[in-house]
Amino acid sequence: MKVSRWFSWLMFFAMIATALAFSPGAHANADVEKNIAKPGNWAMQAGDMFNQRYSKLKQINTKNVNKLQVAWTFSTGVLRGHEGSPLVVDGMMYMVSPFPNKVFAIDLDTQEIVWKYEPKQDPAVIPQMCCDTVNRGVAYAEGKVFMQQADSTLVALDAKTGKLIWSVVNGDPKTGAVNTNAPHIFKDKVITGISGGEWGVRGYISAYDINTGKMVWRGYSVGPDKDMLIDPEKSMTWTDGRMQPVGKDSSIKTWQGDQWKNGGGTTWGWFSYDKEQNLMYYGTGNPSTWNPAQRPGDNKWSMTIWARDVDTGMTRWVYQMTPFDEWDFDGINEMILADINVRGKPTKALVHFDRNGFAYTLDRVTGELLVAEKFDPQVNWATHVDMKSGRPVTVAKYSTARNGPDVNTKGICPAALGSKDQQPASFDPNTKLFYVPTNHTCMDYEPYKVEYTAGQPYIGATLSMFPAPNSHGGLGNYIAWDADKGKIVQTKAEKFSVWSGSLNTAGGLSCYGTLEGHLKCVDARDINKELFKFKTPSGVIGNVFTYEHKGKQFMGVFSGIGGWAGIGMAAGLQKDTDGLGAVGGYKGLSRYTELGGSLTVFALPN
Amino acid sequence: MPKSFLLLRIFSVPSPCFLACVMAFMVGSAWSQSTPPPLYQVLEGRKVDAETMKGFRAWRAGACDRCHGANQEGMVGPSLITSMKTLSKDEFVKVMADGRPEKGMPNWAGNPGVMNHINQLYAYLKGRSDGAITQAKVEPLP
């Protein structure tokens, strides 16, 4: 009797233990975690779920990187902007091209194309992609490759054969809801956003079941609380020096009338995930239209950093960086999660380099605002962020709303491109610094009234962008940033905006691409020591990545000028006082690059 | 009577209005075909008539600058300053209605803000291309 009772207690505890082992709180996605734990893989777009873009590989290092040479190359067969990067998982490379979004699976032993998948999409989608026909990459988990098509269809493909497993429509391109982002796998969900802020699309982020493609939840960026998955009492925001509940109708109260229905707040950037908190982090884009006079109010929750529970989508906390945007400073840039000291205390931090020129450090658990400082001294639309209210203190002269529609507000810094756009920064756990690819441009911005027609552009401003005056003369900088002190620690001037995602490695390197087409590696401890430079076939707007195959380390990056840099910079960068044509910046870039579409992979000589 | 005598008789009438009418009549009828009204009217390179203003607003409604440049100088899409020198009116209307899908230009058939003022948009762009309108942003004639 005693033995059997003891035995049943044992069984009971064993069951509890088993249940706990499979409980949601502790898991990210076993397969993804296994893949990213191998330093030889590059199994997620950012290398990991924290968006750190750091590799433990060190075969290529500061002492030998000058010997790096081209190991192999691959043309995607597609022109226009090549953003994102391929993934490498266990000897196979997976990538997707710009529209028409061809997916390739390449065997790294032979560089043969094992399979290729090209979806059928209506080319009418192309003109609805505001800022080039980019696609920021595939995701991989559990033997499936996930790709987010431009026409908003999300697909899961068998990683061995390329066969379609499931597909789901994520948006309605007839309204301008198209996609450019990479999907991300967190736990058992495929997370993907939506584009169309320039078409009056009301933004949202969605989670689909990894096995079936069934939508599990969707959280809107603006509108009624239940649409946004906001709990008025439990969803918190930083205000008045502390975290407080956002309260009822926190979004609708900040819009006039029905304007929120075409309110923007799209979600086309990068996503990160902390499994300990079970929170995913991302930012929302600009409110719609670009004419602020048509949408008075804070326009919450556009331009906002969000933390959502990945199982339910419920909002844990939010922080709006640019209330009542007047400049198109989309808040969608990556949220880098890093455990660093802030104000002397070990902090689970979230660090974000925003389009608006401010770098924010928040506590990613609570959502408290810790640091908010300019990462380009030329930023002038606000003097600083008031740390108590969390609100930027704006400058009247650069307020396009105050100056009004049909008035050209001049000399605003940064330009709408931002001090940094989607090109992601990296974190180096060795130096505890962030390595940031930046733009150094300003703009004249003239808003005007527009009418909404579904599926038509709903923009309402015309812009002219130019190099930041009285500066080093170039259009970009690569910087090393201290997210505790909120300071630029080192800066390296670049001729053009640095529009590529950076990579840091245990080999002491920090690498990025340039718009002229170079892959560059600098010393992470002194970024002005340029250790390697190579001109690839076309301007680089992709993200540098690295992997190991059969004991050899490789480093690669896409070439293919485009994105908003290629469109907006290549011709938009002039001070057009006589209206007769492009000068300066445009002619400059066109001296260095044409369109392209290829991958270059480097390694040390044998 | 000799012609010169007739002319003398006409020009001896002192009224300037009469003279102006005669001049206009002579210019208008004797030496040219009947001229159509001007496509656009512009003063100081940037002040335009009400119809051409509508064309400018149609340009803005379509946000055409995002492909053709803030001053029609070209970006992803070609310079309209150049294209409009060779596109006929009919070709222009067709391109606007059908788009150039292979090149990424949408068709504007579904955008009343643009298509309802297609003639005025043509006039505005022609004015830019001719160089008579010297910058994209125009204002009404006084």
Image (tube, coloured by chain):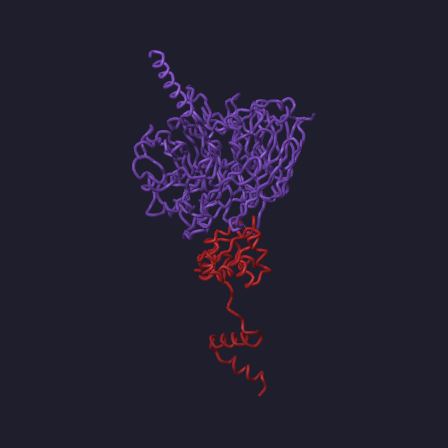
Chain colours: A purple, B red
Measured as percent of width and height from the top left, residue A547 is found at: 59, 28
Outermost residue to the right: A606
Instruction: Relative to A92, say whether B116 is above or below.
Output: below
Q: Nearer the viewer, residue A496 or A410?
A: A496
Which of the 4 image quarters holds residue A110? top right
**Quarter the N terminus of chain A occupies:** top left
Residue located 58% across and 28% down the image: A90
Which of the 4 image quarters holds residue A72? top right
- Residue A397 visible in rendering: no
Measured as percent of width and height from the top left, residue A87 is found at: 56, 33
**Quarter the C terminus of chain A occupies:** top right
Which of the 4 image quarters holds residue A348? top left
Outermost residue to the bottom: B1
Outermost residue to the top: A2
- Residue A274 visible in rendering: yes
Measured as percent of width and height from the top left, residue A179 is found at: 49, 43
How many marks overall? Answer: 0
Q: Nearer the viewer, residue A47 or A537?
A: A47
Measured as percent of width and height from the top left, residue A230 is found at: 34, 36
Q: Nearer the viewer, residue A303 or A178?
A: A178
